[in-house]
Image: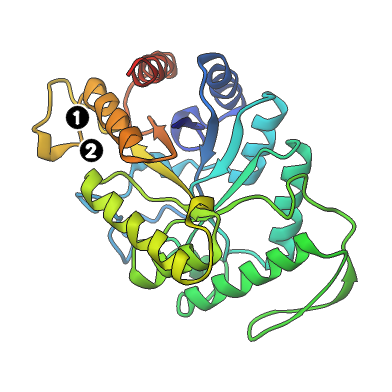
């Protein structure tokens, strides 16, 4: 199982030195990938609760960096780790601009990009960027159509229900052919079907493994029904560490637990068939030095198993 680490693109460590430190340390520690998320607003009272146990958005999101610029910066300071978005809201910019940005990043990183898309949870962010909250699934489908064609063909045009792109030559092509892997964060039946039929893989968040693997089985069965090879799909599991000083009750893991309990969870995930697991230490009150020490203990502990 591949192991990844979230970049500090939120909170007090969201600055150049923080990104450089984590990027270089990740490679030195033996991590396989770096990941970053996407925020454009941090309202005091959002209209929808944050998708967590207490429904409160972390205060660290009040300080947020651009995900693709951050990954480009990380690419310049690394040579091996893959670079992923978990998740990028692909609906907040025109698909043609998104295609150019993603292609550029894949070229500059020499083919290390994994594109993870999500639909977000906060209507205010959609209002702020001038994109309708309604119809997000259809907008994502047409965005995927444009990306696939842009990456695959030398000449390109698109006329759809939402977007029109005049006939044009596309000279810039991603390093990865036919394009960077696209993974989707999804949990609804329609979302899981979209993963199975259209994506390179799935971006779930940590949950009890029996539930996770049940949803993964649904995706694989739908992929096979759609004429795809289930073995081609990749699961990258995000784990937001909510660390406790004493061992949590088993039913609380992975919502919270000690570092050793998260190591055990990761080992069990590998045995269950998870392809990749990446951790985010961004909600910890620890210093950056302390977080990197924990990141080292985590990767060593999982690899030792």
- Helix, strand or loop at label 1? It is loop
The CA distance from mark 2 to mark 1 is 7 Å
How many numbered marks have been drawn onto this rendered protein structure? 2
Measuring from the top left, give residue 264's x and y in whole percent.
Answer: 25, 26
Please say whether residue 215 is visible from this viewpoint.
Answer: yes
- Helix, strand or loop at label 2? It is loop
- Assess disc 1: are there few (<14), some (14-19) or many (≥20) residues with their C-alpha within 10 Å of its C-alpha: many
Q: Quadrant of the C terminus?
A: top left
Outermost residue toward the left? 249
Q: Residue drawn at (50%, 15%), measured in percent from left and top?
A: 29
Q: Residue drawn at (45%, 79%), measured in percent from left and top?
A: 134
Measuring from the top left, give residue 36's x and y in whole percent.
Answer: 52, 41
Measuring from the top left, give residue 115's x and y in whole percent.
Answer: 59, 50
Looking at the image, is 57 positioned above or below residue 78?
Answer: below
Residue named by callout 2:
254
Callouts 2 and 1 close, C-beta under 8 Å: yes
Colour option used: rainbow
Is 108 situated left or right of 266 in this image?
A: right
Q: Residue drawn at (35%, 15%), measured in percent from left and top?
A: 304
Looking at the image, is 160 positioned above or below residue 120?
Answer: below
Please say whether residue 123 is visible from this viewpoint.
Answer: no
Q: Residue drawn at (76%, 56%), measured in percent from left and top?
A: 100
Looking at the image, is 219 positioned above or below residue 104?
Answer: below
| 148 vs 15, nearest the viewer | 148
Residue named by callout 1:
257
Is 11 situated left or right of 140 in this image?
A: left
Measuring from the top left, give residue 53's x and y in whole percent.
Answer: 20, 49
Q: Quadrant of the N terminus?
A: top left
């Amino acid at each position: 199982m591949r192991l990844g680490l979230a970049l500090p693109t939120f909170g007090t460590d969201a600055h150049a030195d923080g990104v450089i430190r984590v990027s270089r340390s990740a490679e030195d520690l033996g991590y396989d990938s770096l990941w970053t998320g996407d925020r454009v607003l941090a309202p005091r009272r959002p209209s929808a609760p944050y998708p967590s146990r207490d429904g409160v958005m972390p205060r660290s999101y009040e300080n947020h960096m651009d995900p693709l610029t951050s990954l480009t910066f990380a690419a310049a300071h690394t040579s091996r780790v893959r670079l992923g978005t978990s998740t990028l809201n692909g609906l907040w910019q025109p698909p043609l601009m998104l295609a150019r940005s993603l292609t550029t990043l894949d070229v500059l990183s020499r083919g290390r990009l994994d594109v993870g898309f999500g639909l977000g949870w906060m209507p205010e962010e959609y209002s702020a960027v001038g994109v309708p909250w309604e119809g997000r699934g259809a907008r994502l489908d047409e965005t995927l159509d444009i990306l696939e064609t842009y990456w695959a063909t030398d000449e390109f045009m698109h006329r759809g229900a939402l977007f029109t792109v005049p006939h044009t030559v596309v000279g810039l092509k991603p390093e990865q052919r036919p394009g960077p892997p696209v993974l989707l964060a999804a949990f609804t039946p329609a979302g899981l079907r979209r993963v199975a039929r259209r994506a390179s893989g799935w971006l779930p968040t940590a949950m009890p493994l029996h539930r996770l693997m049940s949803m993964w089985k649904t995706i694989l069965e739908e992929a096979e029904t759609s004429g795809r090879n289930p073995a081609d799909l990749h699961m990258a599991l995000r784990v937001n560490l909510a660390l406790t000083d004493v061992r949590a009750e088993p039913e609380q893991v992975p919502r919270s637990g000690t570092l050793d309990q998260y190591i055990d969870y990761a080992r069990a995930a590998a045995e269950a068939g998870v392809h990749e697991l990446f951790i985010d230490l961004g909600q910890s009150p620890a210093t950056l030095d302390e977080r990197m020490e924990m990141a080292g203990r985590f990767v060593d502990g999982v690899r030792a198993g």
